[in-house]
Image (tube, rainbow, N blue to C red):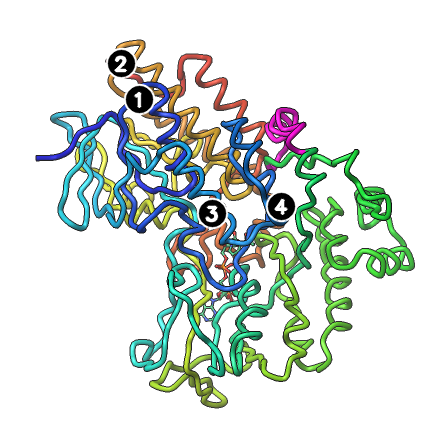
Amino acid sequence: MSERTDVLVVGAGFAGMYAVYRFRKQGLSVKVLEAGSDVGGTWYWNRYPGARCDVPSLEYSYGFSPELEQEWDWPEVFSAQADILRYANHVAERFDLRRDMQFNTRVISVDYRDDTQRWRLTTDANEQFEAPFCVMATGCLSVPIKPDIPGAERFRGAIYHTGSWPNEPVDLTGKRVGIIGTGSSGVQAIPELARQAGHLTVFQRTPVYTIPANRKRMRDAVQQEFREHYREIRDLQQRNAGGVSNFRPQQSVRRDVDMDSTRRLPNRLLELGPEQRDAVMERFGLGALLGFRDIYTDAQANELANELYRDAVRGMIRDPDTAERLLPKTYGLGCKRQVLDRDYYDTFNRDNVSLVDLSETPIESVTEAGIQTSATHHDLDVLVYATGFDAMTGALLKANIRGRDGMPLAEKWRDGPVTYLGLQMAGFPNLFTVTGPGSPSVLCNMLVAIEQHVNWIGDCIGYLRSEGLRSIEPRLQSEEQWIAHVNEVAQGTMYTAPNCNSWYLGANISGKPRIFMPYVGGYPRYRERCEQEAAGGYEGFRLLA
Ligand code: N01
């Protein structure tokens, strides 16, 4: 006998948590199924040393509760994983969310039953749950991947993945640690691992562009000023392409800090002469490059920025050969998600760190005792994979979703993800995805994107109920037009440059169709489009009584 509710939600990260609050508030019964042992999603799984968020915490926080905004203290401007997880736990307790959640439960199939017009979810313990509505709140970066290296199973030391780091402390004192991968996770972990380990060997396939992160402690006066302006800040977020308000505190600014000086720079790098460019780099460092708008769309400006970046990095590394290996040369700034770091380059000046350039000496195999490259054997006690995720589509495909007439989602998405607004798929009635492919998701402040999606879904279910309708799914034509639009706006940006290979494009997984998955047209434009659909009675969808 299966348990029945109005809505089933898969995942208890920030999306699933808010879904419980929102749906309950409108009188729906909800059940959340979560593979982990508690709430937090990304911040539950990614506990590796150095993990932290790249959006300021006062903005990367829920906006649905003014009381919550007033009572929570953030210790740093950009929070560490442990502080964000503490916040998630606080929210779960404060709103009694766990009451409707079942943990340690992995959903292994999600089936639409044509006879009952309900979704049936089956778990790894062979439990079954049914509901007329199903919300996949499974996250965009929640399926960690490990490369297929010959002999990987033979390694006798400890193996970790940054995306599923253990809850218990990992003692690396005196150990010989190897890490594969230099994306956001690797770049954050490497300086911390180097501090803890006896020796750290970094196996790098593609060098990264990384910018020093803001490391400020939160000042009470700044937090207070945010609290006094929160409604205005949430409103600004709704009108910003990336869902961040960029609110500048006025009263609490220290007189000795020139907070806005980089904002006085011109918008275009190509407007600066050589001396001005050197002066900018000298004064503001690598981060200044990101402020020039032309580097994202103009190939000449982009290459100039890349060269300025490389010159600056050459000056940071003591060993010129190591410096040269650390310089990205095969793609440009703006192609991948911008990486932020604390002490990344300086870590390569430490005596206990060595860099292996896999483009010169590729990995041949993992052995019982370490990694064999084409040049030598590296003895290791611990191997850390910082090799990323099957992004955006991975968790949805892994859930084995089958829609009307048993149609597998994997078949519908054989040539890449097809959705309408990143919210729904034709053939999958009453199934919703939160921050799905085709929505701004990973290009937006996640908390803003999540609340907007969950609110839209809640309103949609409310509409169906009030109109006596049973189901909603997109028209095929709406999907086709939307995907064409998603592709069109991504063209001409550095994201889709021919030499760019990123997880946004699925290029980190062999055989995955090369499609730019998130919507790059900006959050406000996207939100307005969703609002128009709702206000117009969901014309782009098929509604069935
Ligand atoms: O994963 P990635 P990530 N042999 O895919 C390498 C978010 N995030 O976990 O480029 C050797 O970016 C791969 O090399 P290459 C953020 O959105 C956010 O680091 O494929 N190397 C690359 O260096 C981010 O973008 C935060 O040649 C192999 C690395 O592994 C996203 O998560 C922090 C390999 C994977 O990099 C993913 O970041 C952390 C192989 N066979 C993560 N296979 C913040 O908020 C892969 N690699 C700051």
Label 1 vs 4, first from the N-terminus: 1
Indicate yes or no whether the magenta region holds residue 234: yes
Residue 469: mark: 2
Q: Amino acid at mark 1?
A: Ile
Mark 3 crowdedness (10 Å alpha carbons): few <14, some 14-19, many ≥20: some
Check the image and report above or below for 138 versus 365: above
Check if mark 1's residue and mark 4's residue have beta carbons within 8 Å.
no
Magenta stretch: give its range: 226-242
- Cα distance in 3D space between marks 4 and 3: 37 Å
Relative depth, front residue between 456 and 352:
352
Residue 455 lies in quadrant: top left
- Where is residue 405 drawn, in percent x and y? 17, 33
> On the rendered structure, is 31 left or right of 346?
left
Label 2 vs 3, first from the N-terminus: 3
Identify the residue shown where x is 58% and y is 31%.
70
Mark 4 crowdedness (10 Å alpha carbons): few <14, some 14-19, many ≥20: some
Q: To which residue does mark 1 refer? A: 472
Label 4 vs 3, first from the N-terminus: 3
Q: Which secondary structure is most common in the magenta stretch?
A: helix
Relative depth, front residue between 122 and 14:
14
Q: To which residue does mark 4 refer? A: 493
Indicate yes or no whether the magenta region holds residue 153: no
Check if mark 4's residue and mark 2's residue have beta carbons within 8 Å.
no
- Where is residue 9 drawn, in percent x and y? 30, 35
